[in-house]
Image: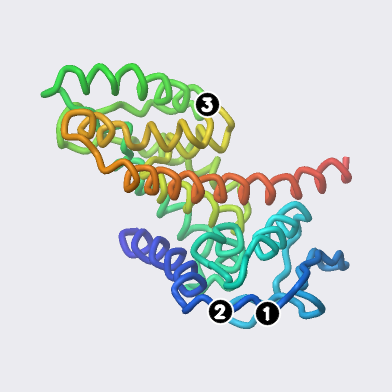
Amino acid sequence: MAHAHHCCSASIRNGIDTFVLATPPKRFYKTTNVLCTDAGYEVTLDHRKLKTPNGAPFMVKSEPLAIAVATEFDGQKDHIERSRMHISALCFTAIDNPNKLTKLDMVNYLLNFVATDTVLFQYDDEKDLQELQRNEWDPLIEWFNQRFETNLQKTMNITPPQVSEVDKMKIAKHLQSYSLETLHGFVFAVDTLKSIVLACAVIDQQITVERAVALSRLEEEYQLKFWGRVEWAHDFSQQELQARLAAAVLFVHFNCSENLIKEKSIL
């Protein structure tokens, strides 16, 4: 499981890095478009069909997702700034799946996150911080436990919280209800927030993207209050996390909406 944990994170990160880290190419197209085919939705740049970094045809089952990717490409100026194209990067990673991850790999990776969840580690040495964490995080732990019928407990020291096998199975069952593609978005959200509780809350629309990011940085924000901050650096970091999380949430919802439409049409 530890191998899957590392492999999954590295794979999704590497897939996105492959897309992001290359030298920004010049914009070589004037217009973008979405094509509907029997197999799904494609994106064209002028008359060229979009391909993934591995050379696979870009094809998704969700029209809003294809539109989002086309919009990201359309929003580029003289150069294609891949580092700001989070939805496209997620789509490419899901299509190419560089490390050939299975659903089980990804579910195990996410389950491993539970015992290191940001909101489950609270501190009792600083009373103000403890109160802040209790007020802000505890209601979400409670929501999570009600939503998934689990019994996650926070820890007040460096000992990792104990997560029962029963709870793991309940969380796994929920995660397995998502498609493999959708789980890429879920992993991206959890990696961004370092919290499966916050990721589930924002994907379930219990909290906003902005609030989820703020809650994931609660301790950092508390420390900054005392030690001061470099305003622009802080803002950049916050905005980057919000952009990443927003992309992950949209990616999950767009993938799920396609499934919902399918299910409704069958009924």
Q: Which residue is mark 3?
A: 147
Q: Residue 70: horizontal and vertical position, in percent?
A: 72, 62
Q: Give me the C-alpha separation between circle 1 and circle 2.
A: 8 Å
Q: At 42% across and 62% down in the image, what residue appears?
A: 8
**Viewer-nearest residue: 42 or 140:** 42
Q: Give me the C-alpha separation between circle 3 and circle 2.
A: 45 Å
Q: Residue 214: horizontal and vertical position, in percent?
A: 39, 33
Q: At 43% across and 28% down in the image, what residue appears?
A: 150
Q: At 42% across and 38% down in the image, what residue appears?
A: 213
Within 10 Å of disc 2 (Cα), the crowding (few <14, some 14-19, many 20+) is: few
Residue 91 falls left or right of residue 8:
right
Q: Residue 181: horizontal and vertical position, in percent?
A: 61, 59
**Viewer-nearest residue: 21 or 37:** 21
Q: Quadrant of the N terminus?
A: bottom left
- Identify the element where label 1 is drawn: loop
> Which color mode does the image show?
rainbow
Q: Amino acid at mark 1?
A: Phe
Q: Which mark is residue 25?
A: 2
- Identify the element where label 3 is drawn: helix
**Viewer-nearest residue: 64 or 266:** 64
Within 10 Å of disc 1 (Cα), the crowding (few <14, some 14-19, many 20+) is: few
Q: As displayed, is residue 35 above or below residue 192? A: below
Q: Quadrant of residue 139?
A: top left
